[in-house]
Image: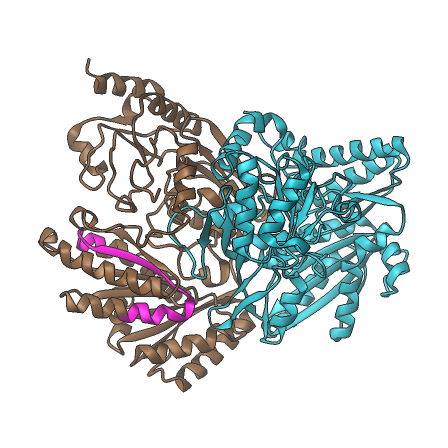
């Protein structure tokens, strides 16, 4: 279809000012937080479910690819329009529709920024648990698409555990509701399969989320280690001891240095590893539990344990952790982050392999990750203008994913497959496994208009 | 040889002579809503399951999977039952990684047997699931029906605990979903889709689940209330507090009589908490919940510890099992509503049952908005079917008012003939139908029984 005609038709649906077409605007939406670049044909900003439905119907009738985008922080190329088409932005659909504390639910539009929701909930004494590091900018719709995690997911689970229902626009523009405010609605768990489907099954226009009362007490500790091995072993020891802290985060020396230089949060520059351990719950017994954690740290040669004495100190520790990607980003022009996950018992062995890979390819790798979940985030640092380095980066990333799978883990814990990990899907899944997923794709999106070319490797999609 | 005889002989070739039951008398035990299969097949491995399913798919034979048979009354009336696939021999532990707090085990393993083994392992562990029929149900049956119990309040349900599944697809393919990592977004979350799918999308063969360490301390608190409203108000106070007990249930007198007879005479309604935590926190919970309960109007506070605590929750989970042993025609319904409206459903169940000459036993997961209602029907089930169907219709309407629904979990055939066991149809059933058609094009798995 001619581009001009498409723009005219879409303007009829959402209004002229909500179709963006200038070269500059197009270029703003050709990328996300991965290394993938590709231009959309046009950009639409629907203001209602009805408009989303009409745009999808339009795309369906003409077989035009369509991708729902939030803030574009995707780390695997999932929100880039690799086959062109319509980028659908949810900037206008950013309302918190209902805060139902009585039933411990909120109903939101997908364009709401994660941290904005939390800010509003805090006033009611409630919390929405998932806390991706980028929550300041990410949208809840994007969190749903990727099944985002975050530090507190160790105890509270990821986005899917807190997403109980959705309003969804299907491939032909039909609007249906899955799940709901109540649990266990009859039938298949469509909400469960939509979360983390990277926008390939439908477009979510409303979300029903679980909220919880705040915990009574929180204790945040920082354990400093002279060896990364000891840090990793401590994580395994805490989990094996049967303690499930609210968070168990780890940073290596390269990250610690970058964070300290950027934010001056008081991390010791010579530390090989820092663990951020947070306990929450009733105050009764917490002192004893934290002593038990300290004991396990000591058994694994901890150098120093610092306990946050107040909210300001706690915030400082977390500012260091949440700003880590940004801080590391200052070290080299680019970074590629993978997010392979391993069983918690395999953490020290996997880290060792990651350092070997860094050496082998002669590329610095910084590690900052959700250790308690076994979810690694090796940040591979490079300069994309150096073509040989770029090639080595991709090889190193593939090798790290392979290592994770060999350890009994998987290739992605929370960033998604997108485009970057398509080939690595074969490390984890057989042709039969992928075929089963493809049947799900076909049931939801028979013509393949939603985010084509993502999640499932091309061979599967052809099947 | 007839087709059936040929089929039996072929199946015997796949799973062994003694593992195919075709004797009509023995098969009666495998009948579903009055339909008897022509064979019950008991495979001994996932590979054997795969062969049997592929065989059935080629011949368009309907298969109904079965664990220990506690949920054979689940679902709509089958259109066809050719084979029952008994999974009890597919019951091996395939990966026990206690230090990673994960376990892979085949679906024929009874939940209670697994819990017993885990409790004896090291410091003691458990799978955080405590569904109805706990003492008898297999893991496969629990997961396929997404059965949940009281502790869901703090631990969530199977969708929060399962990390992966191995299933046999309707075409016989052995398919793996998820893995053993606690975070995993590699591809679609097929595990979620299969949990609660009633065996209609694949035969569940192996689960990988999270484990949790047994808590340091545990106790039960029983608080009788004269009025349902008072119990509900107290629940509301606790749900929104920071006290977070492991479970909070509201049980009516008819149910309490079967669970903890010595309490049943104290009042018509009971708020019951399970406290499971570190020692100090459990002490605090007992003190605080007891004190605020009395303030809220509880006429008594009874604390149970150790064996008393365990026995109480076992009896609560097995309430429907005991009821069914007394009355094979007993009816079970499950309503799901927004959590603040659970008491309205309890009240509706009691009222609508009473008006039709039944006594409803109600067990409500008060913090989750799930209400299980049980009616004892006894003899003359056919004559009473209309009344039971009317009762169900009323509860569905009430639950829909509160953003929920209600399903029949168990009922005599005569009742099922009169109702949609899945409650009020929903807008997303069009997607469910397409999924079923794509994944099971020959419609062999649990034909007609599951929602789509």
Q: Answer above or below: position of A130 versus B31.
A: below
Judging from the image, what is the letter of the chain drawn in cyan?
A
Magenta stretch encompasses residue A245: no
Instruction: Give how far across and how far down residue A309 sits, in percent.
Output: 76, 75
Residue B32: which quarter of the image?
top left
Residue drawn at x 37%, y 26% is B53
Q: On the rendered structure, is B80 left or right of A29?
A: left
- Magenta-tinted stretch: B324-347
Residue nearest the observer in this picture, B346 or B152: B346
Question: x%, y% of residue B427?
Answer: 40, 50
Q: Is residue B415 left or right of residue B121?
A: left
Q: Is residue B331 magenta?
A: yes
Chain B tint in image: brown
Q: Which of B428 and A275 lies nearest the eye of the viewer?
A: B428
Percent x, y of residue B277: 53, 66
| Quadrant assignment for the C terminus of chain A | top right
- Placement of B114 over or under B285, stated as above or below: above
């Amino acid at each position: 279809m001619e581009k001009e005609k498409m723009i005219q038709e879409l303007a009829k649906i959402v209004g002229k000012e909500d179709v963006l077409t200038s070269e500059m605007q197009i270029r703003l939406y050709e990328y996300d937080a991965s290394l993938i670049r590709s231009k959309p044909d046009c950009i639409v900003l629907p203001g209602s479910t009805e408009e989303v439905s009409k745009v999808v119907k339009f795309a369906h009738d003409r077989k035009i690819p369509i991708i729902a985008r939030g803030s574009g922080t995707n780390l695997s190329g999932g929100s880039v329009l690799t086959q062109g088409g319509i980028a659908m932005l949810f900037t206008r659909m950013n309302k918190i529709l209902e805060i139902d504390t009585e039933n411990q639910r909120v109903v939101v539009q997908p364009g709401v920024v994660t941290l904005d929701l939390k800010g509003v909930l805090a006033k009611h004494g409630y919390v929405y648990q998932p806390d991706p590091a980028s929550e300041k900018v990410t949208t809840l719709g994007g969190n749903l698409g990727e099944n985002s995690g975050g530090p507190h997911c160790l105890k509270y689970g990821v986005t899917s555990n807190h997403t109980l229902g959705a309003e969804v626009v299907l491939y032909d523009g039909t609007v249906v509701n899955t799940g709901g405010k109540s649990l266990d609605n009859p039938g298949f768990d469509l909400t469960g399969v939509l979360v983390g489907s990277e926008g390939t099954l439908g477009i979510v226009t409303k979300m029903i989320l679980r909220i919880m009362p705040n915990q009574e007490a929180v204790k945040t500790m920082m354990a400093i280690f002279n060896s990364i091995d000891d840090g990793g072993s401590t994580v395994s020891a805490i989990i094996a001891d049967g303690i499930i802290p609210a968070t168990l985060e780890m940073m290596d020396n390269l990250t610690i240095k970058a964070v300290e230089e950027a934010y001056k949060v008081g991390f010791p520059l010579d530390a090989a590893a820092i663990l951020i351990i947070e306990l929450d719950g009733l105050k009764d017994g917490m002192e004893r539990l934290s002593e038990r954690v300290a004991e396990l740290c000591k058994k694994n040669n901890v150098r120093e344990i610092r306990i946050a004495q107040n909210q300001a100190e706690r915030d400082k520790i977390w500012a260091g952790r949440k700003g880590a990607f940004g801080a590391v980003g200052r070290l080299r022009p680019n970074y590629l982050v993978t997010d392979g996950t391993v069983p918690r018992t395999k953490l020290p062995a996997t880290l060792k392999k990651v350092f070997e890979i860094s050496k082998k390819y002669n590329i610095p790798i910084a590690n900052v990750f959700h250790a308690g979940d076994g979810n690694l985030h090796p940040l591979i640092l490079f300069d994309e203008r150096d073509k040989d380095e770029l090639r080595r980066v991709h090889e190193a990333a593939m090798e790290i994913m392979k290592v994770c799978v060999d350890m009994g883990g998987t290739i992605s814990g929370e960033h998604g497959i997108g485009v970057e990990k398509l080939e690595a899907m074969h490390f984890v899944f057989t042709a039969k496994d992928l075929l089963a997923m493809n049947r799900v794709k076909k049931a939801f999106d028979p013509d393949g208009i939603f985010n084509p070319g993502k999640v499932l490797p091309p061979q599967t999609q052809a099947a | 040889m007839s087709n059936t005889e040929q089929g039996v002989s072929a199946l015997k070739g796949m799973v062994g002579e003694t593992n195919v039951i075709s004797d009509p008398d023995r098969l009666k035990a495998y009948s579903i809503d009055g339909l008897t299969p022509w064979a019950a097949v008991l495979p001994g491995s996932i590979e054997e399951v795969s062969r049997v399913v592929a065989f059935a798919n080629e011949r368009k034979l309907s298969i109904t999977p079965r664990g220990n048979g506690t949920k054979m009354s689940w679902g709509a009336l089958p259109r066809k039952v050719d084979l029952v696939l008994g999974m009890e021999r597919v019951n091996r532990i395939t990966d026990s990684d206690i230090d990673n707090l994960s376990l892979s085990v085949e679906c024929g393993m009874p939940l209670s047997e697994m819990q017993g083994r885990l409790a004896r392992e090291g410091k003691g562990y458990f799978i955080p699931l405590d569904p109805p029929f706990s003492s008898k149900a297999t893991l496969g049956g629990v997961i396929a029906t997404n059965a949940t119990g009281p502790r869901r309040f703090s631990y969530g349900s199977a969708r929060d605990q399962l990390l992966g599944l191995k299933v046999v697809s309707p075409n016989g393919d052995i398919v793996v979903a998820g893995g053993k990592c606690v975070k995993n977004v590699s591809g679609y979350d097929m595990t979620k889709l299969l949990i609660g799918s009633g065996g209609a999308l694949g035969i569940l063969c192996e689960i990988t689940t999270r484990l949790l360490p047994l808590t340091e301390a545990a106790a039960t608190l029983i608080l009788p209330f004269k009025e349902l409203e008072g119990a509900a108000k107290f629940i509301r106070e606790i749900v929104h507090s920071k006290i977070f007990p492991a479970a909070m249930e509201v049980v009516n007198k008819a149910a309490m009589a079967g669970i903890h007879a010595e309490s049943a005479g104290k009042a018509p309604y009971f708020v019951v908490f399970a406290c499971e935590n570190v020692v100090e926190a459990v002490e605090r919970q007992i003190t605080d919940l007891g004190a605020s309960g009395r303030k809220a109007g509880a006429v008594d506070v009874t604390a149970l510890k150790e064996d008393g605590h365990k026995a109480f929750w076992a009896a609560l989970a097995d309430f429907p099992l005991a009821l069914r042993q007394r009355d094979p025609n007993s009816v079970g319904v499950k309503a799901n509503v927004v959590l603040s409206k659970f008491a309205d459903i309890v009240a509706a169940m009691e009222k609508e049952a009473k008006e039709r000459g039944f006594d409803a036993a109600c067990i409500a997961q008060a913090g989750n908005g799930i209400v299980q209602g049980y009616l004892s029907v006894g003899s003359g089930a056919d004559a009473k079917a209309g009344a039971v169907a009317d009762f169900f219709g009323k509860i569905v309407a009430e639950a829909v008012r509160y953003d929920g629904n209600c399903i029949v979990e168990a009922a005599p055939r005569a009742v099922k003939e009169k109702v949609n066991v899945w409650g009020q149809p929903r807008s997303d059933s069009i997607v469910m139908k397409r999924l079923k058609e794509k994944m099971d094009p020959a419609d062999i798995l649990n034909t007609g029984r599951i929602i789509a």
